[in-house]
Image (cartoon, grey):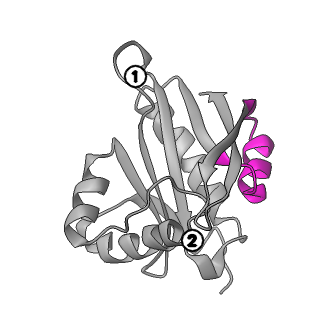
Amino acid sequence: MSISNTEMKVRKYSEDDLSQMIGIWNQVVEDGIAFPQTEPLNEQTGREFFSEQTYTGVAEQNGVIIGLYILHPNNIGRCGHIGNSSYAVRSNIRGLGIGEQLVRHSLKTAADLGFRLMQFNAVVSTNHSALHLYEKLGFTRLGTIPGGFLMKDGHYEDIVLFYIKL
């Protein structure tokens, strides 16, 4: 499958997208190398999870959901102006630029919603594509937490924190 920006659009999710979204999200959870979640979503928990976010966006190509992101505050109250996002792309089409379009869309959406910064708390150090993308887009690397992520196979990897002003 090839992806072109003219064929792909990023938009707010709808109820009709949920089944595909849950499948994509669960691929990442089941891989056990990027998301902190350990339990897959089902129809009920997926509906609740995605609707609770400040914004949930999907990448669609020819009527098929190929990726998604969630956007929400990183914290509450006096730190609620800092956003946080997570991204997921269908496993069989990763590396084609879909993630970059999702990140770019999330940054614009976050700014439009009044967030002043975006902070990523736990980018796994072995996720080289994400590390490269965030640096390419101008994120600042804040530091590393040694052994901050438990991989599916039981070993620990470092996590990297990033932020960008919106």
Q: Residue at x 49, y 38 (%)?
A: 84
36 or 152: nearer the viewer: 152
Magenta range is 123-143
Which percent across, then down, holds residue 64? Answer: 45, 80
Q: Taking 133 as reference, is 20 above or below it?
A: below
The quadrant of the rendering that contains the C terminus is top right
Residue 95 falls left or right of residue 151:
right
Crowd band around label 1 with a 10 angstrom C-alpha radius: few (<14), some (14–19), many (20+): some
Which percent across, then down, holds residue 143? Answer: 74, 29
Residue 16 falls left or right of residue 4:
left
Q: Quadrant of residue 33?
A: bottom right
Amino acid type, residue under disc 2 in the picture: Asp
Which percent across, then down, holds residue 130? Answer: 71, 53
3 or 23: nearer the viewer: 23
Q: Residue at x 37, y 64 (%)?
A: 39
User: Is label 2 in a helix, a strand or a loop?
Assistant: helix
Q: Residue at x 59, y 38 (%)?
A: 120
Residue 143 falls left or right of residue 123:
right
Q: Which residue is mark 1?
A: 80
Query: Residue 31: which disc?
Result: 2
Q: Taking 117 as reference, is 134 above or below it?
A: below
Q: Residue furthest left?
A: 44
The quadrant of the rendering that contains the N terminus is bottom right
Which percent across, then down, holds residue 121? Answer: 58, 37
